[in-house]
Image (tube, grey):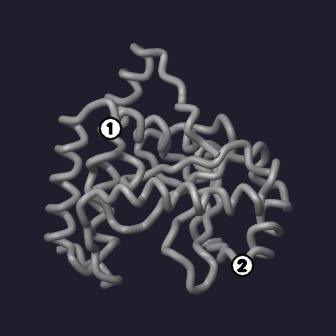
Amino acid sequence: MIQFEKSRPIVVIPYQSRWVTEFQQIGGELRQVLGDTAVRIDHIGSTSIPDLPAKDIIDIQVTVADLDDPAIVAKLVGAGYAMRLEYGRDEYIGIPDPDSPELRKRYCREPEGGRRIHIHIRQDGRFNQRYPLLFRDYLRAHPLMRDGYALIKMRLAAIFPDSIEGYLYIKDPLMDMLFVAAQEWAQATHWQPDEGYL
């Protein structure tokens, strides 16, 4: 039997309309810190999808032209954001190469004492930069998929109430399966990311 380490409790709550306003405030602050270093700043993850229950954590994607630009880290650290070097890549079942540039990222957290946020910094045009935007817009456009995903998230939180590792062990491959449908939808509709970025 697989054993998962304990973490902080996994709490999925009903959708909160305040998440939009909180993103706009935090994203605006990031825009001031990063300036033109950020190509775009997007609200991603479950808190960006109306009517989807979520953990009360604002996920933000900062798109940059060059992930290796030293100004990115310098500006964020200078503003008090906590860089987390251990999270230097994403995973996707369709790209098994752990060193693929399509999965590289940088990651940081809120300044000490700030509202809980996850900031994913990804390079413009890479697979992992497109993934969360398409996934978000697909679930916004498909209420049945959104509601099914919500049910799975709530059941996983019940099964793994004290382990984010266990929660993600099931949720991540499920997201990748849904992403196949999202890609087909994107091709059929000529999808482009919305203009609601900062």
Label 1 crowd bin: few (<14), some (14–19), many (20+), radius 10 Å: many
Residue 104 relative to residue 66: left or right: left
- Across and down, in percent, residue 106 comes to 65, 60
- Mark 1 = which residue? 139
Quadrant of res 143? top left
Gap in angstroms between the C-alphas marked 1 and 2: 33 Å
Q: Nearer the viewer, residue 85 or 19?
A: 19
- Across and down, in percent, residue 31 comes to 72, 55
Label 2 crowd bin: few (<14), some (14–19), many (20+), radius 10 Å: few
Q: Nearer the viewer, residue 100 or 132?
A: 132
- Across and down, in percent, residue 87 comes to 57, 66
Q: What kind of element bears circle 2?
A: loop
Which residue is rendered at x = 27% and y = 66% of the image? 167
Of callouts 1 and 2, the N-terminal one: 2
Q: What kind of element bears circle 1?
A: helix
**Residue 77 drawn above or below residue 46:** below
Quadrant of res 1? bottom left
Which residue is rendered at x = 31% and y = 84% of the image? 6
**Residue 169 drawn above or below residue 7:** above
Say which mark, if any, is on residue 196.
Answer: none
Amino acid type, callout 2: Gly
Which residue is rendered at x = 62% and y = 73% of the image? 84
- Across and down, in percent, residue 157 comes to 21, 68
Residues tagged 1 and 2 counted as in contact (Cβ below 8 A)? no
- Mark 2 = which residue? 80
Which residue is rendered at x = 49% and y = 74% of the image? 116
Q: Nearer the viewer, residue 80 or 182?
A: 80
Amino acid type, callout 1: Leu
